[in-house]
């Protein structure tokens, strides 16, 4: 695997400026498809002045390499080679965020060899000096079980389907709500049912159900949970 993962936010945010010299902070944000974890992770990263990695993009890029080469996402050998050869610097997000890529990403993500090929780059990203925010399915359980703060962001399948249908429509994809809901239910079942690092909340995760929350409220709840975890951590770090 070559290059370094895409970084959304490296600028010092208000928290980092106010807390210069504070200890490393790894924030793991997991949750099912279209739960809003990506948007939340980007905002949290900007707020705390931390780099952010959307780990779903790694699985989407692996899937895209196969689809673009006319290979099946079920092809274990080809999927493993694609994951190992991923160039992490030049992701075409508009391409990777298409509906078909999400579905194929969930298929390649169930292949243990693919997960193994992508794990180290994620761990290296998390353990950068100062910390990082990573969002995905298994960050708090498998990639960073040592994360300082773990959030599990969820919402009802109907709410997630509404949000995803709007997002896909805004990108110009012609989709019906019913199709998107069916995709989400299928992906939830595959992501939660796989043997290797299935989607689930870590036992020490703070669960954030955003079914009845707007993005602002979800962000405020996330920051409050992170601040609370930090407040518990600081006496230990100091003495
Ligand atoms: O978050 P997303 O929808 O972009 O993720 C696409 C797929 O990638 C998802 O259905 C399962 C897989 N994935 C994973 O298995 N582990 C992660 N840490 C992130 C994504």
Image (tube, rainbow, N blue to C red):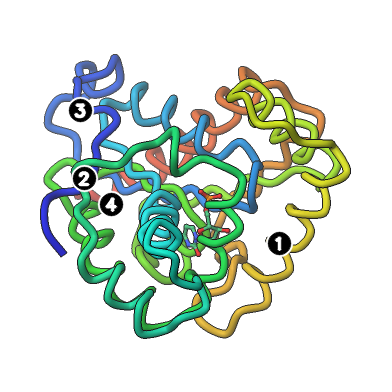
- The Cα atoms of the two marked residues, 4 and 1, are separated by 38 Å
Q: Mark 2: few, some, or many residues within 10 Å (few <14, many ≥20)?
A: some
Q: Quadrant of the N terminus?
A: bottom left
Name the secondary structure under disc 3: loop
Residue 148 percent across, percent down from the top left: 36, 52
Quick check: 186 left or right of 18?
right
Q: Residue at x 51, y 30 (%)?
A: 39
Quick check: 198 left or right of 149?
right
Q: Tags 3 and 4 in contact by the CB under 8 Å rule?
A: no
- The Cα atoms of the two marked residues, 4 and 2, are separated by 13 Å
- The Cα atoms of the two marked residues, 1 and 3, are separated by 31 Å
Q: Residue at x 40, y 56 (%)?
A: 68
Of the image marks 1 and 2, the number of the one nearer the N terminus? 2
Q: Check disc 4 and report the residue beneath it.
A: 236
Residue 157 percent across, percent down from the top left: 81, 47
Residue 149 percent across, percent down from the top left: 43, 49
Q: Mark 3: few, some, or many residues within 10 Å (few <14, many ≥20)?
A: some
Q: Tags 1 and 2 in contact by the CB under 8 Å rule?
A: no
Q: Tags 4 and 2 in contact by the CB under 8 Å rule?
A: no
Q: Check disc 3 and report the residue beneath it.
A: 10
Q: In the image, which is nearer the foreground, mark 3 or mark 2?
A: 3
Residue 9 percent across, percent down from the top left: 27, 27
Q: Check disc 1 and report the residue beneath it.
A: 188
Q: Check disc 2 and report the residue beneath it.
A: 24
Q: In the image, which is nearer the foreground, mark 1 or mark 2?
A: 1
Q: Is residue 86 above or below residue 12?
A: below
């Amino acid at each position: 695997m070559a290059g370094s993962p895409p970084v959304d936010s490296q600028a010092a945010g208000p928290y980092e400026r106010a807390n210069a010299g504070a200890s490393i902070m790894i924030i793991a944000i997991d949750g099912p498809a279209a739960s809003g974890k990506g948007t939340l992770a980007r905002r949290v990263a900007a707020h705390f002045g931390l780099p952010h990695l959307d780990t779903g993009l790694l699985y989407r890029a692996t899937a895209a390499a196969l689809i673009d080469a006319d290979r099946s996402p079920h092809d274990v050998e080809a999927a493993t080679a694609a994951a190992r050869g991923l160039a992490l610097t030049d992701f075409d997000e508009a391409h990777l965020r298409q509906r078909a890529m999400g579905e194929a990403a969930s298929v390649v993500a169930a292949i243990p060899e693919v997960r193994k090929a992508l794990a180290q780059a994620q761990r290296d990203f998390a353990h950068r000096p100062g910390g990082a925010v990573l969002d995905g399915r298994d960050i708090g359980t498998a990639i960073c079980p040592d994360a300082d703060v773990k959030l599990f962001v969820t919402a009802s399948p109907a709410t997630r389907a509404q949000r995803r249908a709007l997002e896909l429509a805004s990108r110009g994809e012609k989709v019906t709500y019913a199709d998107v809901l069916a995709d989400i239910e299928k992906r939830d079942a595959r992501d939660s049912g796989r043997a290797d690092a299935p989607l689930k909340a870590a036992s020490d995760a703070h669960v954030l159900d955003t079914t009845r929350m707007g993005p602002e409220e979800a962000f405020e709840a996330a920051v409050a949970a992170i601040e609370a975890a930090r407040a518990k951590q600081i006496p230990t770090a100091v003495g």
